[in-house]
Image (cartoon, coloured by chain):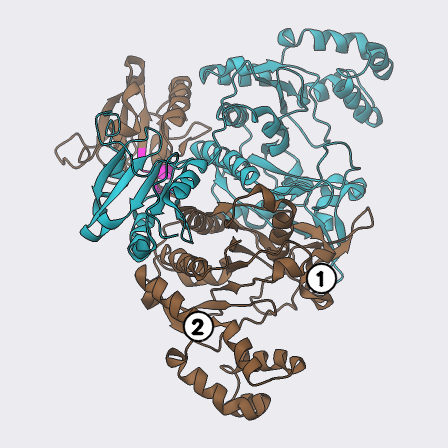
Chain colours: A brown, B cyan
Amino acid sequence: MALPGFRDFYPDDCAFRNAIFAKWRDVAYRYGFVEYDGPPLEPLDLFTKKSGDEIVTQLYHFKDKGDRDVALRPEMTPTLARLVTARHKDFKKPLKWFSIPQVFRYERQQKGRLREHYQLNCDIIGEAGLEADIELIALVIDVLRAFGLTEKDFVVRLSDRQFWTDFMNAKAVPEDQRYAFIQAIDKSERESREKTAEKLGPLADEVFTILAHAQSTKSVRLDTVEAGLRHRGLQDYVKRDYTVVRGLAYYTGVVFEAFDRSGEFRAIAGGGRYDTLLKNLGGVDLPALGFGIGDVVLGEIIKGKLPWWEPHGGIHVLIADEIYRTQAMALIQKLRETWHEPIDYSFTAMKVGKQLQLAEERANAYAVIVDQQITTGFVAVKNLTTRNQRIFKVEDVTPEKVNRPNFWDNASIERDREYSTGADPSTSSG
Amino acid sequence: MALPGFRDFYPDDCAFRNAIFAKWRDVAYRYGFVEYDGPPLEPLDLFTKKSGDEIVTQLYHFKDKGDRDVALRPEMTPTLARLVTARHKDFKKPLKWFSIPQVFRYERQQKGRLREHYQLNCDIIGEAGLEADIELIALVIDVLRAFGLTEKDFVVRLSDRQFWTDFMNAKAVPEDQRYAFIQAIDKSERESREKTAEKLGPLADEVFTILAHAQSTKSVRLDTVEAGLRHRGLQDYVKRDYTVVRGLAYYTGVVFEAFDRSGEFRAIAGGGRYDTLLKNLGGVDLPALGFGIGDVVLGEIIKGKLPWWEPHGGIHVLIADEIYRTQAMALIQKLRETWHEPIDYSFTAMKVGKQLQLAEERANAYAVIVDQQITTGFVAVKNLTTRNQRIFKVEDVTPEKVNRPNFWDNASIERDREYSTGADPSTSSG
C-alpha cells in the first residue's frame, strides 16, 4: 500500500496524469513560457522564511544525515524565488516561467484529501505593468479551455488586493486589525452575514455594498484587466468579485481564483500579483505575479468527459507461424523506426485469432499479418476499424502509405476471411 | 542554494532534461511499453525488505507526523513490485511497463556525485521466455540510438548470471562463499589479476579462461539472445562479457550493462532478469526482467552533441505603435490558438528595432509586424532566417500558409527595409 494520501499511477492513471501535463505544457509553451524545475527536497528555512514557523506543522520535514533541516516542498514559489535571486542577471526580463512540481503537505487525513499533488505554476517576473496581469489571467483561462471547458463550465473571479489596502488606509483601519479584516472578507461567502458584520464592525455596511455591487465599484486595475481580456475575446470567462482576497499575506495587486460554475468543487486555480515577495525573501526587488493549478480538482472536473487520454492506435504484428518469427522481428524493428506508434507482438507462439483478439483489446489501429507471403516480401495489413485487409510490400508498411486518406473506405477490397477472431482456422504452430 | 547533491533546472537545463525524457518516452512507447508511476515517498520497509537493513545508511528516511517510518525512493523496483502484486490480476501478461522516477540516495558527497537523479525504468513482467530478454535489450539499444549514439559510441555487455550459478553448482562452491565469488568476478576488471586469483582460489585459472574467451564459452541463453538481436540487426551493439554480474543479489538470468566505448564514464545502463524477486518480496510468483538508465551519465555523453534541445521557432509579434496594441492582442490570441509554437510580444512600449532584436535573440522563426496596415486587415510577416518580409491578410497568418515550402526562398520579394535591427527609423510611440 502507498502511504495514506499518496497516489499510485497505474498505466491508465499515469496516461491521464500525463495528458493533463501535456496540455499544461502545450498552452504555457504557446504563451511563450519556458519550463524550470527544482529539487523536491529543500532546506526547511526556505519555506519558513516565506510562510512563518506555523507552516512546519504541515510539512514533511526531517534532519538529513548531514544534520541539515530539510523538507519536501509544499509549494514552488520559494524555490522559484531562490532560482531567480541567484541568477536574475543572466536573464532578460520579464521572465515567463512555468513548472509542474509535485508538492507535499502533511494535512490531517480527511476523506479524499491528498498529501501530494501536482501543480502547474506559471509566473511572470520583472514586469510591473498590468499587461502582465492580463497575460497571466488569459493563460489561466486558456489552460482550462484546452481541456474543453467553456465559459459555462468555469469562471475566473477577479479581485484587487490593493483596492482593499487602499480602503483600509482611507478608513484608517489599524495595522493589527488588517489581517482579520481581510480574513473576514475572505470568509464572507461561507459565513453568515451577521458573523461577518460582527467581524467588520462599523465598516460592515460599506463593505457589503462593495461586495454586492462589485461591477460598479471602481478599480482602475480591474478596469484595465477586464478591458485587456475583452480585447482577447475572453471577457465571458471573468467576473469581478471583491470577496476574493487569497488567504496568503503576500499578494499586493490583482488576485483571482477560478471556480467551476456548478459550485461543486474547491477552487480550480488561484493566483495574483506579489510584487514585494522576492525582496522580502532576501532576494532581488522584482515585481512578480503567478498562479497555480492543481491536478486533482481539475482532474475531477474533466474526468468523465471525452476519454482522450486513453491509449489507442498502434500496430500489432501477428506471427502466423513460428517459422516466420525471425522475419517478423526484422519487420518489427523497421516499423518501430518508421512509425511513431506502439508496435507490439506476442513473445510466445499463439494462435493467430488470439493474437488478433489481443490487438483488438488494445484498440490497435492495424494488425500486420506475417505468414508465408513474407518469404516473397509481402504482408497483409488489417485495418481494425473498418476490418478490411490489404496486401502490402514489406517496405510499403509506412504511415504515409497505410494511413492514406480514403484508402480503407472502399468496401469492395478484399475482406479478411482467414484471420477473423470468430472462426480461427489456426495456421499457428502454437 | 539547493541542498548539496540536488540539481536546479533553469530553463536551459530543464529543456535538456525534458528532451531526454521525451526520447525515453518515445522509444518505450514505440516498443509498446506503457508508463506508470508511484510516490517518491514510500514506507521504509518497502526498501529494506528488498535490499536489507544496510540500505538504510544510504536512504533519506525519517518518521512522519503519523509516526510512520518513511523514505524517499532510492530505486523504482520495490514500488513496481508493490503495484504489480496488488493488482496483477487486472492486467494481461506480459506487462511491458516503464517509468521515469526521480530517485534519491544519501551518498557521501563526492565531487560531482549527485544525491538524486532521474531514471528510465523498463520492465517486462510475466514472461519467462528469452524473447522477452531480447526485446528488453533491443529496447536499451534503441533508447541509446535515439540520441544519435552508434555502435562506435557504446556497447552492451551481455552476461548470464545463471551461467555462474551453474558453474558454482558444478564446482560445488559452498553457499557461504558464493557472494564473494560473484563479487570477485565483478571486480576482476578493476583489480589486479593476482588479487582476483587470490579471491577465486583453485578455480581462478578456469574462471580466467572463461572471461578471456567469452564468445566461445557456451551459454544457450546468450546464444539465443545474440541470435535474436541479430535478427533485428542489432548484433554490433552487444558483446558477450562474463565479468558483468551486476552487484545486486537478485538477478537470475541474462544480465547486461551498457558502456560508452571510450571507457570515460561509468555504466550508462544496466539490468537483467530477476525471476524470483517478486515472489521473495512477498508478492506474486511472476518472472520479470528490467533495466534502468540514469539521466546523468547519459546527459554527460550526449551533451556537446547537437543542441537539439535548445528552444527555437515561434513568433514574436512586434507592435509598431501602442495605438495598435488592442488589435495586436486579438491577433496574438488567434495565433496562439492556431500555431503550436510560442507566440510572444512585449508587455510595454518599445522601439520596433528593439522588439525585432528580442525576436532574434530568442531564435524566433518569424516576426509579425502590427502597424497601420492592421486597420485594413493586413500585417507584415518577416522570416527571421531569410530576412525576407511579406504581407499577409490577418486571417492568413497560419502555419499552413506561412510555412509553405519554398515560399520564402524567392530573393526578389519585398525586403524588410523599415524594421531592420541596424537602422531603426522608429515609428514607435515608446
Does A198 sit above or below residue A125? below
Pick the front one: A295 or B98: A295
Q: Which amino acid does label 1 sit on?
A: Thr
Q: What stretch is highlighted in magenta?
A: A357-366
Does the segment drawn in magenta span residue A365? yes
State the residue at coordinates (85%, 14%).
Answer: B195
- In terms of secondary structure, where does tag 2 sit? loop
- Residue A427 visible? The answer is yes
- Relative horizontal placement of residue B368, taking residue A93 as reference (left or right): left
Give A390 or A60, whichever is nearer the viewer: A60
Circle 1 sits in a helix, a strand or a loop, which is it? helix
Residue bearing mark 1: A48
- Closer mark to the observer between disc 1 and disc 2: 1
Find residue A264 and name its label.
2
Residue at the left extreme, as displayed: A412
Q: Give percent across and percent down for residue A395.
A: 30, 19
**Other-residue count near label 2 (Cα within 10 Å), few / some / many at <14 / 14–19 / ≥20:** few
| Residue B425 to residue B272: above or below | below
> Badge 1: few (under 14), some or many (20 or more) residues near its Cα, within 10 Å?
some
